[in-house]
Amino acid sequence: MKDIRMTYTDTDIFLSTYILTFFRMTGIYVYERVECEDAQMQKLMRYPEVSFDIEIFILNDSDSKFEIPPDAIVISMGKKESGRLNRNDDIIYLKANDSPKTCMKKLLEHLCESYDQFGMEKGCLLYLLELYDQNHIMETILGTRFFAPDQDIYREVCVNYSSAVQKIYELNCDESKFLMFSYVYLAYEYNYYCKRLNEVFLYDVNSILDILNDLASGSDEQWNDLDLLYAQVYDDLLGKYREASVYYAKAAEKDYNAFACYKMGNIWKGKYRDPITALKYFTKAAYINPIYYRAIYKMAECYVSLQNIEEAKRQYMRIVQILQIRCSKQILRPMEIEYLYKTYKNLAKIERNDYNNINGAISYYENAVYLWNQIYDTQDDFCSGFKNAIRKTSSDIFNKQYKLLKEKLKISQIYDNLCTLYSQISNQEKAKIYEELLKKEG
């Protein structure tokens, strides 16, 4: 398989997510870079220089701050006469009302025309795109992996996954690497969600490993995502962390698979309780992807475990810098809301307990309250860019997940802390407000 890197602006959330998740389902790991207009943010984003077989740029105009190679594929939502993009055969022009599926189809057709490995399976890839879109695979994967399990969502997920897996099976997935990988990948995803709900696995895990073995033995070249999926099966489904670590290490061999490094860090932090080793992996993940806020969050937690509070605070502040800008543009994904909220809480705790800075703690708690109040409900338009695109589908998974997210974040504890802190600085008016809010939360 080819190594692909995709560079996109911080406003192209839905399209980039759509493309990344589709490629993930077909066994192609896409390395991502985000281009941000904010000067302060740019200082945080020092990506390592690595060469890739295929470069994809999503641009709203021609003023990219990254150097665009002459053979890169450009998805342009700007004008055709844009100066630097005056090329004919490697630009995919999108109209304002083009759907992500339309863009993905144009991208696949371009790849199939330019690369033999894609061209030989053009029919399978286009079929998978229909399946991906009709069965709401993107919403299903994001919903099942990022949020608390829910029985209503589980039933909808069950229909989406079961239908998709069955359709791939009926096509005889042995004849296509992409179909074969998608079949086993969706089976893994479904089983992983079953595990989180304490449900019985629908697919036999040994059968999943057998299919992965068939894929590995039938390939003369490196399959980008195969080692990663092996690792996730051993890690998430079987709890065999030594075997998982071996495959994560293989997936991270090229030094730019940030997700593999992140998952390795999770094993060392959570299972082996070794924050020093875990920190090495999280740091590497954040080096590869400088805005990998989940890796940075885990770095901060490791520093807290090692009682290096000053460095922990510095890492939490990196997350604020990364996500606060996106928050102001109303383009936060649901998971980003959760991590920014938890970061504010942790910063408030540090200010209160370690620096005895009551006003600083109040400020961070107030930020968390503001964020919690903006989380989607039927009257709210927060993160409208991401949600409006989601509303175009017939799936209501994300609407349910926003409700679950609001319940998960437990605002009552913050109300209680603010009531206490305002009382300590003799601001009884504010203390009373949060006391009343606390009563309403029960």
Image: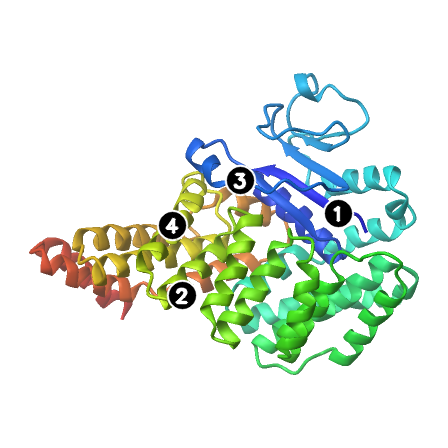
Residue identified by numbered label 4: 374
Under mark 1, the amino acid is Asp
Left or right of residue 428: residue 338: right
Q: Residue at x 83, y 51 (%)?
A: 125
Q: CA distance from mark 4 to mark 2?
A: 13 Å
Give x and y (percent) for residue 155. 62, 71
Q: CA distance from mark 3 to mark 2?
A: 36 Å
Q: Residue at x 32, y 63 (%)?
A: 411
Residue 335 sits above or below residue 109 on the image:
below
Viewer-side label of 3, 2:
3
Q: CA distance from mark 3 to mark 4?
A: 31 Å
Under mark 2, the amino acid is Glu
Which of the labelled discs sits on residue 3, or is there none? Answer: 1
Sooner in the amino-acid sequence: mark 1 or mark 3: 1
Sooner in the amino-acid sequence: mark 3 or mark 2: 3
Q: CA distance from mark 4 to mark 1?
A: 38 Å
Of helix, strand and loop, which one carries label 3?
loop
Give x and y (percent) for residue 246. 68, 70
Viewer-side label of 1, 2:
1
Left or right of residue 99: residue 151: left
Under mark 3, the amino acid is Arg
Residue identified by numbered label 2: 407
Residue identified by numbered label 3: 46
Q: Are marks 1 and 2 in contact (CB under 8 Å)?
A: no
Q: CA distance from mark 1 to mark 3?
A: 20 Å
Sort mark 1 into few (<14), some (14-19) or many (20+) by Cα contacts within 10 Å: some
Q: CA distance from mark 1 to mark 2?
A: 40 Å
Q: Specify whether residue 285 is in view.
A: yes
Sooner in the amino-acid sequence: mark 3 or mark 4: 3
Of helix, strand and loop, which one carries label 2?
helix
Under mark 4, the amino acid is Gln
